[in-house]
Structure formats: C-alpha cells, structure tokens
Image (cartoon, rainbow, N blue to C red):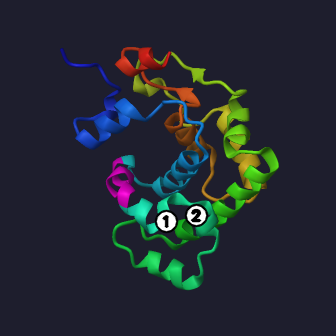
Amino acid sequence: MNKIRCGWSTNDPLYIKYHDEEWGTPCHNDRKLFELLILEGFQAGLSWITILRKRKNFKNAFDNFDPQKITKYNPQKLNQLMKNEGIIRNRLKINAAKINAKCFLEVQKEFGSFDKYIWQFVNGKQIKNKFKNLKKIPAKTKESDAMSRDMKKRGFKFVGSTICYAFMQATGMVNDHITECFRYKQLK
C-alpha cells in the first residue's frame, strides 16, 4: 500500500526521504538548527529541491556548518566559496552565513543554547496544525513574524518572516504535514 504524503514531496527520492525522515520532526540540536537556518537563507528565491541536491556540497564548503569556523572566514575563503559550483554562489547569502554564524554564537552565549532561544517563539512545543490541503498552509504566521523581528534586531540576515516560517516547518516547530499524510499522525 502506498503511503499518503504531502503533495510537495513529489516523486523525487531525495524529496521523499527529506519529507519522510526530517521535515516537521522536532529538532533540538544546535548544529542541525544552524545548518537548517543557513540552508533556508540560501533557499530564498529558489526551490528547496535545489538546496537538497547541493546539501552535501554545502556541508563540505561550510566546514560541516561549524559556526566557530565560519565566523573566522577571511575574504579569500569567501571568494573561494563564490567560485564553488557545488553551492549557491550568491555573495549576499555567503556573507550572511558568516554574519549568522556570529549571531548564532552570541545567542548561544546569551541563552545557553540556540535551541532554547528559537523554541521560545512557539512556547517550547510544536504547533500542531490541521491543514487538509497544501493551499491552506500559510507562508508566515504571527510566530514567524515575531521570530523574524527578533532575529533581525540581533543582526541575523536572510531571516524574513517567510524564511523563518519555512525554518519552523523544517525543524518541527510546527507540524504542517497535511492531515492525510502518514507523517502527520507519526508526529502527532
């Protein structure tokens, strides 16, 4: 019997694996949260499958998403990234990764963990939506608006409300699997 999935997962094996194993699963690991924050920023204006296909390249290019190392990137390293065909070569997004690494470390220092900081926007627990179809899923919410405002105030880049909401979906801060999807029930 075929599993019912959210329509966006298409029939691409990479998308299906991401949908079935990662998207919407509550994440509390700081390194993983940082990775997804960086990838969501790079995704702006592009399709998520483009990012998934380049994810391993991003991991290699950005030192396994180690924020300590990324904050130390010098102009030569940033130029090297601009020449890396395995990632999205956008100077603003590459520079934002370095800025966001610095902000991420500052948040960790202030809150004890990025996890503690980021999950406060949903009061520490997953918002369980009950959407029957993809058209009902919003692009942003009051929670993503609040997250975006606070992150921008702290100096983060590429953290508009729509990006923040996509991040919330990816990290399981919200369960936006449609109600018929097998993952909706698993995550409930």
The residue beneath circle 2 is: 97
Q: Nearer the viewer, residue 114 or 137?
A: 114
Residue lying at the far right in this picture: please name it: 110
Q: Nearer the viewer, residue 165 or 59?
A: 59
Sequence-earlier tag: 2 or 1: 1
Q: Residue at x 74, y 47 (%)?
A: 149
- Position of residue 18 relative to residue 158, above or below, is above
Left or right of residue 70: residue 170: left
Q: Nearer the viewer, residue 133 or 154?
A: 154
Can residue 127 be seen here? The reply is: yes
Instruction: Write down the region rendered in magenta.
Output: 49-56
Residue 108: x and y, percent?
73, 50
Query: Pointer 2: residues within 10 angstroms few (<14), some, or many (20+)?
Result: many
The amino acid at mark 2 is: Ala
Q: Is residue 54 magenta?
A: yes
Residue 137: x and y, percent?
49, 27
The residue beneath circle 1 is: 62
Q: Marks 2 and 1: CB-CB under 8 Å?
A: yes
Q: Quarter-wise, where is residue 155 in the image?
A: bottom right
- The answer for how far apart the CA atoms under marks 2 and 1 are is 9 Å
Quarter of the rendering occupied by the N terminus: top left
Q: Quarter-wise, where is residue 154 in the image?
A: bottom right
Residue lying at the far bottom in this picture: please name it: 76
Q: Residue at x 76, y 45 (%)?
A: 112
Residue 35: x and y, percent?
52, 52
